[in-house]
């Protein structure tokens, strides 16, 4: 039973666990209900009928708003309706409410004034049976609630109204219709919308109540995908892999309860519906008639959606019986009728639960029936995938193999590589189970070529590790007498796939084998592609001379054979390998010619490689505006070819996000990242990277947890790079130099090539870590602690040397472009700061270096420049720089940067006439309250008790205050606050 909530306190049963399910995605609903509470305290309240499907979060929402009501001084009482079938107890929720009120001494006089109501608490209810007695009871209840609300504002919560007994429904109608809401009273009542079939007794009451002027309806719709993902991450303390979160989001379909149950089952072996959830989902199904259950079982075999005609033929019922059964299933909200003569399960998990409940023989029989019906419809290409599925589940493997190959061909024609891969792998699984005489013949269809084709589809779909695995399988399938050209094709395909997952030494070994297997003379297409792959592999292991020699010779042969797509691919390699690379004019000309050749040949993959390198050449030379058109063209071409998840479009989408981030268009960056993640969820780090940087810069330190999750699973070069940057920067923002240096070293080690070539990102990582190291060196240097200072300056020297070596001798052996040189300038300035303190000239150089377009890094350097100007006594110049930093921080929403510049303004006395915000030190209203209590010597626990927050929350506020005031201790914070006029001394008690 609910307990009374006294004003300002939340009183209830002892919690069984300290963790409470978070409320996500309900800001507008909470705001609306909170507005009703405000009006209730002014005796202008309303009743709100909260509707939503089972598990969507009605109870959690009402618990949250009830807690807020209690904190505002309202009394909150809850009555629960319970499903007791046809023998429901009359007035059950109101009896529970009366029991709560009777336990509160404040309301004893009100209860005594209405004795007829008090009888509900006893055994006898005779007064409620006759008409006069029922009316007296209703009037007494209305009077009691009015009197209680006069003592303290009252929130009445009725849960699960769909189970309410008739007497409770009648009493609710009376209360809401008789003006009880004119008092300081609000009523929130919840019910399951998906339980309200057409003849449900609550339906007419709802229709009547909603017409009352003081009653409104609030529909709780399913959560959005991003909100479900946020809920899942908040429920699970450990970092979750993106694929796990994505799968839960897909299956939960916006239902919070389903998401929790699916999350709880992530460590179990079963891939189906968790047993407890299946029981819940099947309850409504089992309430149907036998005929309706038969129709639903048949529909479950068809899938989430089924056409009426197909269902009619499969179930074999007369039309009238089928329509009656469908009407029943739709009325019970298990099926939803579509406008196109189809039926869909209301929720995919309901379909899974019904399907899992089928007997094995029943399941196989129905699958066979659907396969035969689809085969007879004359839609061979479109239905091939469905037929393959049904034939396989009905154990007709010969037909399943044929249909799987048809489905793969169809997917290839419409540019759907992920689907093509899936169907080809299904065919490969079936291949050994089908006799040689029954397999498709002709057209070069054999297990090795099918496997090679599946690996190409996997690569185009962005499943790079799977592509490697499939090509290795093809290599294992080759016999001793295999054709040499096929054997070479398998090996150079494997080499190309290994390059994409950064297994460079193995790639070089296999490309060497491929090139050795076939002679250069007579010239052949296979040799040209083997040579093109070998040139790339040689370049990646540091064999630059070999790479150039092989690429030039292969280009000559490709021109002789008029292999335009191979010519284009080799021109791209030479543009990247030769001379000044893709940043120089010669490289650009080669790339432009390659793009035209690839476009003319129809080889979209090579055309995309050319467009990506054109974009990268612009970015590396600091021409950000010129970069964007190439990215736009490349992504449009990938979209038309169905290759958006293949490697180069992934790189282009990432580069587009990087450009948006660098230009300071952060909201666009975050929006584009979210859209990319939704469209191509398997892209992983390619979509989340710049959005993680934005989150960190805006003060969301949970981004570090998401960065760590990228490191789960097999090694991924891009994920390692993104995580390394985010985790190093997060450590620097936390002023944790040990962690920053550790992440820099481990990331550089992981990304260093097998030839010992350090990644270009090394200079950025070193500069970020140097920021934390310089902070760490400042305090012991000012305190005269030479040993600690030397330790940090030695670390700074190591990091700056790492930055210098990388920036002057990048991955391609040439000096890095404007971006790399800018990070080097910042690293140099941070090194000087670590060794001897801030240097205005060094920071001026760094500020200028980032002028190619990096808005945020320019602002961070400008802040350091302002600090150096303050140290040099140039306060007017420092104030001007600080104003620019503040404007940029506000425009970007970079809260930590804004707090840092505000702290500098206070420390350096850069504002002659500070406004109210500046006088408050940038503290929030709550932080000012905490600061006042801090000055009175209160502990975190005592602060929490006085402000009705937890001690842990108080501790967080104290930490924020120290950071904003630039203080190292509580005492120093209080001293600064008195000095700056943020607080004034409390009047003495004796005064």
Image: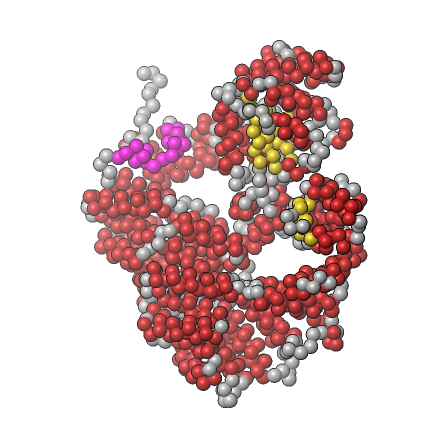
Instruction: Say if 27 sits above or below 639 in the image.
Output: above
Please identify the dominant SS of the magenta region.
helix
Q: Residue at x 47, y 84 (%)?
A: 561
Numbered-mark total: 0
Q: Residue at x 52, y 74 (%)?
A: 495
Instruction: Tell me where residue 953 appears, x and y as whole percent.
Output: 46, 35
Q: Is residue 361 left or right of residue 111?
A: right
Instruction: Say if 447 sits above or below 923 in the image.
Output: below
* Magenta region, residue range: 914-934
Which image quarter is the C terminus in?
A: top left
Residue 931 sits inside the magenta stretch = yes
Where residue 714 sits, quadrant-wise, is bottom right
Q: Is residue 141 left or right of residue 64?
A: right
Instruction: Tell me where residue 633 appears, x and y as whole percent.
Output: 42, 63
Instruction: Tell me where residue 34 appears, x and y as whole percent.
Output: 50, 29
Can residue 747 be seen in this snapshot? no
* Residue that protrudes farthest toward the top in the picture: 113
Instruction: Say if 808 sits above or below 519 in the image.
Output: above
Residue placed most toward the observer, 984 or 703: 703
* Residue that protrudes farthest toward the bottom in the picture: 521
Instruction: Say if 776 sits above or below 514 in the image.
Output: above
Q: Residue at x 64, y 33 (%)?
A: 191
Where residue 79 sits, quadrant-wise, is top right
Instruction: Tell me where residue 46 appears, x and y as whole percent.
Output: 54, 25
Residue 94 sits inside the magenta stretch = no
Residue placed most toward the observer, 684 or 31: 31
Residue placed most toward the observer, 979 or 713: 713
Which image quarter is the N terminus in?
A: top right
């Amino acid at each position: 039973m609910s307990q009374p909530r006294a004003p300002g306190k939340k009183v209830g049963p002892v919690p069984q666990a300290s963790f409470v399910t978070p409320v996500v995605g309900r800001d507008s609903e909470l705001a609306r209900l909170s507005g009703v509470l405000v009006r209730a305290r002014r005796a202008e309240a309303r009743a709100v009928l909260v509707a939503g499907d089972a598990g969507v979060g009605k109870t959690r929402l009402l618990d949250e708003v009830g807690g807020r009501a209690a904190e505002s001084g309202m009394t909150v009482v809850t009555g629960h309706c319970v499903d007791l079938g046809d023998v429901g107890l009359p007035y059950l929720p109101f009896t529970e409410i009366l029991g709560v009120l009777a336990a509160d001494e404040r309301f004893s006089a009100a209860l005594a004034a209405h004795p007829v109501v008090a009888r509900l608490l006893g055994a006898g209810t005779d007064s409620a049976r006759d008409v006069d007695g029922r009316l007296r009871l209703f009037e007494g209840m209305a009077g009691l609630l009015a009197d209680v609300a006069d003592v303290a504002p009252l929130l009445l919560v009725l849960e699960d109204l769909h189970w309410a007994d008739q007497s409770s429904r009648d009493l609710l109608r009376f209360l809401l219709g008789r003006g009880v809401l004119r008092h300081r009273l609000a009523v929130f009542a919840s019910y399951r919308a998906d339980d309200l079939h057409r003849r449900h007794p609550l339906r007419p009451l709802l229709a009547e109540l909603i017409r009352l002027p003081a009653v409104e309806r609030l529909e709780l719709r399913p959560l959005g995908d991003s909100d479900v993902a946020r809920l899942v991450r908040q429920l699970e303390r450990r970092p979750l892999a993106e694929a796990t979160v994505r799968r839960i989001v897909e299956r939960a379909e916006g239902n919070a309860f389903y998401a929790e149950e699916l999350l709880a089952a992530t460590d179990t072996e079963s891939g189906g519906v968790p047993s407890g959830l299946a029981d819940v989902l099947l309850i409504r199904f089992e309430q149907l008639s036998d005929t309706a259950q038969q129709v639903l079982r048949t529909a479950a075999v068809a899938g989430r959606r089924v056409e009426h005609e197909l269902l009619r033929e499969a179930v074999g019922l007369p039309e009238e019986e089928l329509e009656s059964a469908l009407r029943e299933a739709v009325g019970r909200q298990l099926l939803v009728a579509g406008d196109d003569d189809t039926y869909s399960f209301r929720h995919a998990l309901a379909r899974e639960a019904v399907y899992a409940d089928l007997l094995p023989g029943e399941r196989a029989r129905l699958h066979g029936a659907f396969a035969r019906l689809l085969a007879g419809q004359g839609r061979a290409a479109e239905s091939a995938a469905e037929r393959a599925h049904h034939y396989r589940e009905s154990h007709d493997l010969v037909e399943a193999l044929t249909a799987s190959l048809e489905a793969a061909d169809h997917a290839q024609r419409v540019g759907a590589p992920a689907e093509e891969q899936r169907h080809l792998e299904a065919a490969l699984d079936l291949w050994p189970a089908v006799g040689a005489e029954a397999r498709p013949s002709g057209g070069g269809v054999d297990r090795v070529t099918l496997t090679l084709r599946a690996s190409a589809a996997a690569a185009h779909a962005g499943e790079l590790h799977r592509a490697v695995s499939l090509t290795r399988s093809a290599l294992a399938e080759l016999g001793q007498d295999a054709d040499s050209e096929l054997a070479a094709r398998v090996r150079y395909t494997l080499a190309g796939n290994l390059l994409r997952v950064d297994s460079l030494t193995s790639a070089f070994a296999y490309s060497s084998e491929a090139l050795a297997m076939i002679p250069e003379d007579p010239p052949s297409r296979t040799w040209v592609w083997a040579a093109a792959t070998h040139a790339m592999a040689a370049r990646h292991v540091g064999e630059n001379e070999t790479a150039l020699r092989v690429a030039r010779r292969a280009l000559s042969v490709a021109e002789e054979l008029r292999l335009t797509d191979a010519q284009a691919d080799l021109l791209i390699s030479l543009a990247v390998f030769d001379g000044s690379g893709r940043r120089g004019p010669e490289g650009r000309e080669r790339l432009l010619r390659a793009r035209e050749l690839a476009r003319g040949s129809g080889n979209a993959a090579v055309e995309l490689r050319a467009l990506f390198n054109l974009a990268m050449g612009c970015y590396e030379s600091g021409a950000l505006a010129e970069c964007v058109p190439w990215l736009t063209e490349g992504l449009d071409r990938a979209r038309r070819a169905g290759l958006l998840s293949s490697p180069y479009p992934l790189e282009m989408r990432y580069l587009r996000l990087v450009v948006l981030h660098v230009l300071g268009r952060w909201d666009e960056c975050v929006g584009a990242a979210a859209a990319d993640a939704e469209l191509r969820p398997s892209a992983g780090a390619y979509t989340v990277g710049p959005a993680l940087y934005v989150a960190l810069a805006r003060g969301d330190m949970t981004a570090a947890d998401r960065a760590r999750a990228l490191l789960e699973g097999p090694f991924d070069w891009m994920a390692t790079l993104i995580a390394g940057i985010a985790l190093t920067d997060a450590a620097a923002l936390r002023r944790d130099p040990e962690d920053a240096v550790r992440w820099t070293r481990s990331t550089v080690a992981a990304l260093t090539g097998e030839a010992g070539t350090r990644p270009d990102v090394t200079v950025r990582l070193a500069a970020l870590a140097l920021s934390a190291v310089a902070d760490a060196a400042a305090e012991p240097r000012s305190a005269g602690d030479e040993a600690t200072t030397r330790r940090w300056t030695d670390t700074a020297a190591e990091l700056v040397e790492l930055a210098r070596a990388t920036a002057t001798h990048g991955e391609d052996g040439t000096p890095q472009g404007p971006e790399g040189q800018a990070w080097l300038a910042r690293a140099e300035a941070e090194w000087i700061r670590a060794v001897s303190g801030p240097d205005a000239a060094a920071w001026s150089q760094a500020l200028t270096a980032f002028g190619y377009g990096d808005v945020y890094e320019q602002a961070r350097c400008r802040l350091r420049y302002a600090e150096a100007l303050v140290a040099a006594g140039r306060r007017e110049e420092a104030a001007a720089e600080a104003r620019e930093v503040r404007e940029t921080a506000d425009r970007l929403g970079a809260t930590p940067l804004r707090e840092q510049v505000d702290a500098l303004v206070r420390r350096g006395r850069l504002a002659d006439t500070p406004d109210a915000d500046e006088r408050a030190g940038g503290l929030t209203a709550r932080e000012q309250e905490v600061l006042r209590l801090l000055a009175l010597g209160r502990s975190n626990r005592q602060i929490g008790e006085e402000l009705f927050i937890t001690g842990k929350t108080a501790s967080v506020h104290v930490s924020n205050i120290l950071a904003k005031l630039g203080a190292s201790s509580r005492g120093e914070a209080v001293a600064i606050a008195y000095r700056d006029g943020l607080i004034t001394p409390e009047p003495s008690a004796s005064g």
